Image (cartoon, grey):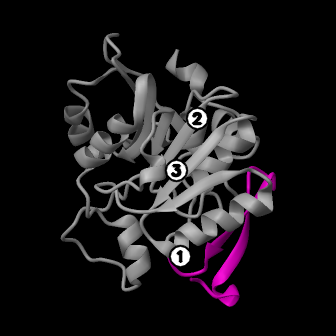
Amino acid sequence: MFAEDQLSDDKFLCGRLRLLQPVQGYRAATDPVLLAAACPAEPGQSVLDLGCGAGAAALCLGARVPGLTLAGLELQPAYADLARRNAERNGIPVEVHEGDLARIPKPLRRDFDHVIANPPYYPAGGSPSPLAIRARAMQVETPLADWVAAATRRLRPGGWLTLICGADGFPEVLAALAPKLGSAAVLPLAAREGRPALRVILRARKGGRAPFRLLAPLVIHQGPAHDGDRESYTPQANAVLRDGAGLTALFR
């Protein structure tokens, strides 16, 4: 487990959430916030966060949508411990279990209305982080197709998968949807206007039959370049990342 002096106490959603995160290691940034904003969960529904880390995505979702039954699966015990601590300190219950996608713990072998996932996206074979716990959180060990398959097994009929990944991994994710997931819609995420989208958010429905849709990109930052220390978010990104707004309207 992480020692107290190895942790920072970070604000998310303009301080609506306070998350303990390792000073050195995988640290949540915008991806889990955007992932949570894209999930179409409604009060009373159940959500499983695969690879929940310190709980950022599940807790951002719980902060936006009250009355959810939230659960998380995390491979690394130190991060699972942080997810439990963060859930308690923010007053948002999350049932967190340690385990692998290939051997999901028995308490999580049930149907969920939604599964969300932010898989590692740095390809295997590159230069890993010298910090093992960070490398394992960020570098691909389990194929993205296996993440899709695990999510599919846990979804009830008609349930939704919401997943964020690198654009280079998207073809593998898309190929893994058939035959059980359909009605797919993809939201590209561009850092700035005119830049290529390096990440995408995908939503797909178990048993869905609607045509595939490629949506207009969500642009995260204003202006052509970074402006000093200020995060120059576009109004739409600012509403999500700071105010806790959802992105579900973009998928309609």
Q: Which residues are magenta?
A: 1-25
Quick one: SS at disc 3? helix
Of tags 1 and 3, the one toward the viewer is 1
Instruction: Compare residues 28 and 4 and report the one nearer the observer.
Output: 4
Q: Which residue is mark 1?
A: 78
Q: Which residue is mark 3?
A: 31
Towards the viewer: 248 or 154: 154
CA distance separating discs 1 and 3: 20 Å
What is the spatial separation of the Cα atoms under label 2 and label 3, in whole angstroms? 21 Å
- The 10 Å Cα crowd at callout 1, few under 14, some 14 to 19, many 20 or more, is some
For the point 49% across and 73% down, the residue is 77
Residue located at (42% from left, 52% from top): 106
Q: Is residue 121 left or right of residue 225?
A: left
Residue 33 x %, y %: 60, 47
**Label 2 to label 1, Cα distance in Å?**
25 Å
107, 101: nearer the viewer: 107
